[in-house]
Amino acid sequence: MILAALLGLPASASELPDLGESARATITEAQEAQLGGEIMRQIRGDKDFLDDPELVDYINSMGDKLVAASPAPYRHFEFFVVRDASINAFALPGGYVGVHTGLISATRNESELAGVIAHEISHVTQNHIARMIDSQKGSALTSLAALAVAILAARSDNPQIAQAAITTAQAMSIQSQLDYTREHEREADRVGLQTLAGSGYDPAGMATFFERLQANSRLYESQAPAYLRTHPLTYERIADLQNRLAEMKYHQHADSLDYQLVRAKIQASEGEAIDAYKRFKVLAGSDQADVAIRYGLVIAALRAGERDAAVKAFAKLEPELQASPMLVTLAARLRMEAGQPGKALEILRAGVAKYSSYKPLVYAYARALLSTAKAQEAKRFVSERLRWWADDQNLYRLLAESDHALGRRAEGHLAQAEAHIRLDQPALAMEQLQLARQAGDGDFYTMSVVDARLRELKEREQREAKK
């Protein structure tokens, strides 16, 4: 969390600061991206890195919408979700933005969630990381590396490891960094407000969420929410936000159904399974029960092993099936678990026809084809989608599964290598390429691609060794 506190900082709107090229003289965008890639390589291996296609798709859709309205819409961003009940979000070098499930669950509307993410985006667009490093000069990169270790170690189950990493990171002057952080926090608030307004969300969402955190902070004592520890809130910040909102045009934003479903899915997955099921069962019995609550009840019931209750609860969602692709994937999951793969395929096929650009539905359909011994059809379907999304690692994984199911080992290992390349895992990619060489069943074209990829990765390895 220290890296989040010192690097994931905020930005400003109407009085935009001089971003300055001096910071870029200390660390280039390429160096920043390389550092962020190294950190992400470690985070992806963390047990709490959440690779749920529906959550990832939603948070990236929101993030992309906000980036398009930011001061730097051309910058690279990637948004990811961390399975953590604490209320937090953080920005990393290279435009990587992490969001805790606890944050999504704690928001009361979509604009509040968008407000926090807009705040983190502003840290990146305003070059806060590069500017921080520029202020540190000599020890900046060393300190930054220590902080990178700290954010990973803070997630460790071993408190001694975490404490050791944090102690190392304290080689910097923490007090001076906190002062610098407060300056950036105010700046990110102001830029974030403009980004929210430009993207169609209610700018007041940022202020209401921060105000609620601040009002409740006295209840936490030493166990304050992670977001308060990494993003210090002050009365001056809140007052500044309120003053700026008073000058902005009021804009009401209705929550999307996808937001409501994602939030319900997370809440149904929190805590003990039986407790979540009982909680949603009570909510579903109230007059205020809506689609999201019934969806959450189905998820919670499945998690608690109450399949009959899940089927019964979903029956009330059937009329809303076409309202969201998330309902389609849930309907197919119920059919699969009931031993009706043919019906599940029908549901998914119709869903893909309606929501052709929704990746989680595409993945679910390909997996259903594989699970019903339709590997050739799965390979054809995935290959077609790769023409749309050539850098999608999940599609390459599915392609690898299809090839292996068809007995095409060389092609399967090559496809798996392509997935590792897109996840910035060169060592694992080279391992798969060597296995493709040894498979002995690849045609001339496949082996030519394998050899070319191996040369590229070895050259990259040599370049990085020289650096």
Image: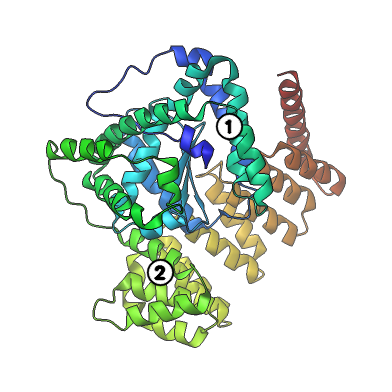
The answer to whether 15 is drawn above or below residue 182 in the figure is above
Q: Secondary structure at mark 1?
A: loop
Residue 133 is marked as: none
Residue 257 is situated, as x and y percent measured from the top left of the image, at 31, 62
Which amino acid does the dot numbered 2 rest on?
A: Leu
Few, some or many residues within 10 Å of mark 2 (<14, 14–19, 20+)? many
- Secondary structure state at the residue bearing disc 2: helix
Question: Looking at numbered disc 1 in the image, what kind of residue is underneath it?
Answer: Gln
Horizontal and vertical percent position of residue 278: 43, 81
| Displayed quadrant of residue 312 | bottom left
Residue for point 52% across, 71% down: 345
Q: Residue at x 44, y 57 (%)?
A: 102
Q: Is residue 17 visible?
A: yes
Between 140 and 250, the one nearer to me in the picture: 140
- Is residue 356 visible in the rendered structure shown here? no
* Residue identifier under label 1: 170
Scheme by which the image is coloured: rainbow
| Labels in figure, total | 2
User: Nearest the camera: 192 or 87?
Assistant: 87
Numbered label attached to residue 327: 2
Local packing at callout 1 (Cα closer than 10 Å; few below 14, some 14-19, many 20+) is some
Q: Is 370 on the left or on the right of 439, as rendered?
A: left
Name which of mark 2 and mark 1 comes first in the sequence. 1
Q: Is residue 434 above or below residue 169?
A: below
Measuring from the top left, give residue 107's x and y in whole percent.
33, 56
Give the Cα separation between the discs numbered 2 and 1: 48 Å
Task: Please tell me in which quadrant of the rendered image residue 21 appears.
Answer: top left
Pick the residue in front: 345 or 81: 81
